[in-house]
Amino acid sequence: MNERTSVTSAWFISTRPKTLLLSIFPFALGTLLAIPATIIINWPLMLFAMLSAFCIQIGTNLINDAFDVQRGADTKSRLGPKRGVQNGALSVNQVYRAGLFCFALALLFGIPLVVEGGLIILLLLVISVICGYIYTGGPVPLAYHGLGELFVTLFFGLAATLAAYFFQTGEVNVHAVLLGLQLGLLATLPIAINNLRDIVDDAKVNKRTLAVRFGETCARIEITALALTPFLIGQQWLPLLALPIAYKIIHGVWTVEPSKAYNRFLGMSMVLYLAFCVLWSLTFLLRLS
């Protein structure tokens, strides 16, 4: 592998491509949910919303990499997948500046959303960018104080889904709230698994995740709740076909000690998220037909 390929690969890995679906599906499903409540779907608006959220997520991931290395949370002994800064292919400053650039792009893509939705959308957009930065940056980083799960549930679940529905209909309803909560909890599942896997290393650098604060048993209970609750509060039957994946994740974290083996459960959590979204969409489309 030549140096250019290595650097390109490092940038690609640093975006955490396996997780980028989390910024797309809330807007796609929120828009789909709006179809019966509106005459015409504004597809360009949905695209701009996706692009803005996509950039916020990549920016958050890059800033996360830069600050985790600076704070000592990412070292050569890291159990999770290797990242660009951690393996030395990229510098902290490179990744930090790239993260800020992505946040700027998110604001740029958000302009049509603000024109359509007004000041409340501008406020939501700015808060989302700020929270993306302080997820691991700033003097009080969210992920270092046990607030990472809350941020992901709100942004990649409720806020994104409700915004998508609001853009199309000008209102929100209980169905959009429930869908947003389902997606938010499933999006948070990988974070909880990641935090349990890294509980020892995080404690060493005073990264006070919920797993570090309350211990392994509470972390396993949290993972169980995140994996099952979306199925308990749903109004669709077809997504229940994804429950076996949830069971395997739950069984795995309760029977395996935190280690590199958790990377498999991390991947399974993304498969669970994808399966749930596809099955939910299929059910909804069948009802529309």
Image (tube, rainbow, N blue to C red):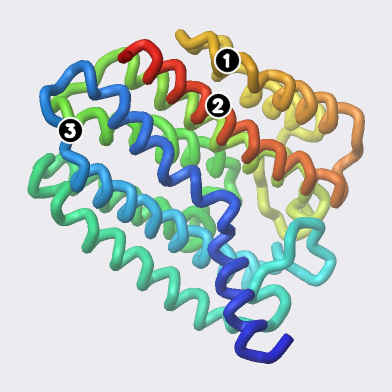
Mark 2, secondary structure of its residue = helix
1 and 2 marks in contact (CB < 8 Å):
no
- Which numbered disc, 3 or 1, marks the residue closer to the eye? 3
**Callout 1, which amino acid?**
Phe
Tell me the tag on residue 41.
Answer: 3
Q: Which numbered disc, 3 or 2, marks the residue that appears first in the sequence? A: 3
List the single residue furthest toward the bottom.
Answer: 3
Tell me the tag on residue 276.
Answer: 2
Q: How far across and down, in percent of the image, does residue 271 sit?
A: 64, 37
Determine which residue is flagged by label 1. 231
Q: How far across and down, in percent of the image, does residue 152 sit?
A: 49, 40
Q: Is residue 205 left or right of residue 148?
A: right
Above or below for 161 versus 200? above
The residue located at (73%, 21%) in the rendering is 244
User: Which residue is nearer to you in this view: 105 or 205?
Assistant: 105
Mark 1, secondary structure of its residue = helix
Above or below for 140 versus 100? above
Q: Mark 2, residues whose alpha carbon is within 10 Å: few (<14), some, or many (≥20)?
A: many
**Callout 3, which amino acid?**
Ile
| Residue 90: quarter of image | bottom right
| Residue 72: quarter of image | bottom right
- Which numbered disc, 1 or 2, marks the residue closer to the eye? 2
Rendered-image quadrant of the N terminus: bottom right
Tell me the tag on residue 184.
Answer: none
The residue located at (35%, 55%) in the rendering is 130
Rendered-image quadrant of the C terminus: top left
Q: Which numbered disc, 3 or 1, marks the residue that appears first in the sequence? A: 3
The residue located at (56%, 49%) in the rendering is 19
